[in-house]
Image (cartoon, helix red, strand yellow):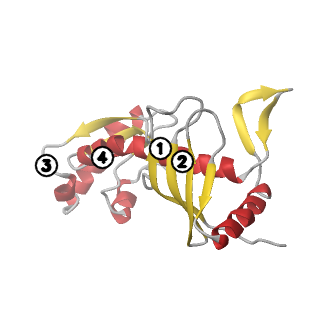
């Protein structure tokens, strides 16, 4: 039986951080190909993720998803090297779902950082390592007001070339997503040094 692409989504994710010991303790509603399959849980004690399908269709979709996941590339654990190569684990539905929960947690942890960056960029050029660290070059007036006038755009261009670009390290970029692409072109920032979008 050939299975094309499957859409596997988790909604209503709840993570019990205090219950998490060996694994992440969570509960979530599982959707496969747009159908509400049921609930999945992990007690956080190192055991398997458990499925509670709502009906027979849910059971069938879970089985299809298990087959589909086994055809995906293996999970590469870059931190563990054996015989000079990273350890790989065959993909399974359980691993796929655990990765979805981990991605959700990582996104959640980034929200406060991203909000801070968005607030700072209203009156500053923000630069640094996306989603990790940043510095600012602050202005007295909002960036939105500056870019309305040719004089303001030219001031930004000069400041970026004199004060920001020379300070950018290899993995750093300008993070302002509040400046339109047309204006960014006028600022003549070197290729790859302006973040496209965060998140």
Circle on res. 101: 2
Mark 4 or mark 1: which is in front?
Answer: 1
Circle on res. 105: 1
- For the residues labelled 3 and 2, the Cα–Cα distance comes to 41 Å
Give yes or no for contact between labels 4 and 2 (Cβ–Cβ under 8 Å): no
Specify few, some or many for label 3: CA neighbours under 10 Å numbering under 14, 14-19, or 20 or more: few
Left or right position of 124 against 105: left
Q: Secondary structure at mark 2?
A: helix
**At x 35% / y 55%, what residue is drawn?**
177
In the picture of the structure, the residue carrying the numbered disc 3 is: 141
- For the residues labelled 4 and 2, the Cα–Cα distance comes to 22 Å
Q: In the displayed structure, would residue 101 be above or below residue 57?
A: above
Q: In the displayed structure, would residue 19 be above or below residue 58?
A: above
**At x 77% / y 27%, what residue is drawn?**
81
- For the residues labelled 4 and 3, the Cα–Cα distance comes to 20 Å
Residue 147 makes an appearance in the image: yes
Where residue 97 sits in the image (x, y, percent)?
61, 51
Give yes or no for contact between labels 3 and 2 (Cβ–Cβ under 8 Å): no
């Amino acid at each position: 039986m050939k299975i094309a692409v499957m859409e596997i989504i988790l909604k209503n994710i709840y993570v019990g951080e205090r219950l998490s010991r060996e694994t992440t303790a969570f509960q979530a509603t599982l959707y496969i190909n747009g159908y509400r399959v049921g609930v999945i849980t992990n007690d956080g004690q190192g055991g398997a993720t458990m499925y509670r399908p709502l009906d027979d269709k849910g059971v069938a979709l879970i089985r299809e998803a298990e087959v589909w996941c086994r055809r995906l590339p293996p999970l590469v654990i870059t931190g563990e090297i054996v015989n000079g190569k990273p350890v790989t684990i065959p993909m399974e539905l359980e691993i796929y779902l655990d990765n979805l929960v981990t991605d959700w947690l990582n996104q959640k942890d980034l929200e406060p950082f991203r909000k801070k960056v968005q607030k700072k960029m209203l009156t500053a050029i923000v630069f640094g390592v996306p989603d990790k660290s940043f510095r600012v070059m602050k202005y007295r007036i909002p960036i939105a007001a500056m870019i309305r006038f040719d004089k303001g755009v030219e001031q930004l261009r000069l400041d970026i070339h004199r004060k920001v670009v020379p300070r950018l390290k290899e993995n750093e970029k300008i993070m302002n997503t509040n400046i339109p692409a047309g204006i960014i072109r006028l600022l003549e920032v070197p290729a790859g040094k302006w973040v496209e979008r965060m998140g």
